[in-house]
Amino acid sequence: MDTVPRIRAARWADKDHVAALIADALNSSPIATWLIPDPGPRRRILTDVLGIWVEHAMFYGDIYLTDDAAAVGFHRYRPIPPPANYPTRMGHFAGPHSYRFDLLDRLLAKERPTEPHYHLAFLAVQPSARRTGHGTALLNHHRSRLDNVNLLSWTSTTLDAQRLHVRHGYTPGPAIDLPEGLVVCSMRRSPRHGEIWPTSKTSTTGAQASQPGR
């Protein structure tokens, strides 16, 4: 019988590990290649930028871990501020690539729901642990928590990860077209009592895409 991975809530001491884990999972993905075309500094930049968001989730969301995977989300029950000194830190870490991170943030924010929701920002599995059930275990845990409070959830992902999210109750929403042909998919998981896609959206700083590696 398959063993279900142990899941625990992340602590402050885990934040660097979580950022590095997500960077490893994203490093060769289409979204990372689009954000940072040069493979040389890509992993370092990803780790540093992801560190901003992991730290922010410690204050305005939650992070759950297995030994080889992480799920990072934000509690958007009401508007939340951007990370502290975000433009300055982004410019320092990403340099000339900052404009792509900013563009992605703005495009994702336009599709994010306006009503209270949980924003699943990152779901990532170490490359060596893919297809071992860690991503599925985290999504099952995520689904159970949302159902207990009957809360809408929203995420964004690439086309190749849509199927996994659909199996966990997410419905594909509007596609987000990025320059150079990259497509990011918005996905919504309605509460148990049912919801529909909102008819209006507002843009707020700070969206990030959840990525492959489940």
Image (cartoon, rainbow, N blue to C red):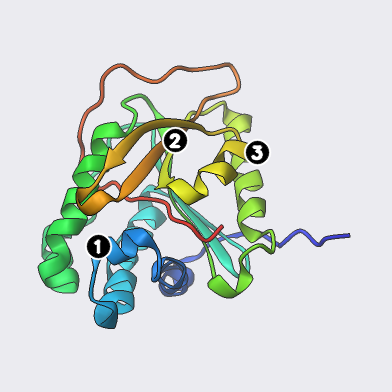
Badge 3: few (under 14), some or many (20 or more) residues near its Cα, within 10 Å?
A: few
Circles 3 and 2, Cβ within 8 Å, touching? The answer is no
Q: In terms of secondary structure, where does tag 3 sit?
A: helix
Q: Secondary structure at mark 2?
A: strand
Q: Is residue 8 left or right of residue 159?
A: right
Q: How far is mark 1 from mark 2, CA to CA?
A: 21 Å
Check disc 2 and give the amino acid type. Met
Which amino acid type corresponds to the residue marked 1 in the rendered image?
A: Leu
Q: Residue furthest right?
A: 1
Give whichever of discs 1 and 3 has the lower sequence position.
1
**Closest to the observer: 130 or 55?**
130
Secondary structure type for disc 1: helix
Which of the two residues, 59 or 210, is positioned nearer the viewer here? Answer: 210
Say which quadrant the N terminus sits in.
bottom right
Q: Mark 1 — residue? A: 35
Task: For residue 106, say whether it is visible.
Answer: yes
Residue at coordinates 53% horizontally, 34% vertically from top-left? Answer: 170
Residue at position x 23%, y 45% in the image: 81
Q: Quadrant of residue 68?
A: bottom right
Across and down, in percent, residue 78 comes to 32, 32
Q: How many discs mark residues in the rendered view?
A: 3
Residue placed under numbered mark 3 in the picture: 144
Query: Which class describes the residues within 10 Å of circle 2: few (<14), some (14-19), or many (20+)?
Result: many
| Residue extending farthest bottom | 40
Q: Which callout, 3 or 2, points at the residue further toward the start of the chain? A: 3
Q: Earlier in the sequence, mark 1 or mark 2?
A: 1
Q: Quadrant of residue 30?
A: bottom left
Q: Which image quadrant is residue 77 in?
A: top left
Residue occupying image coordinates x 29% and y 78% = 39
148 is higher (above) or lower (below) than 214: above
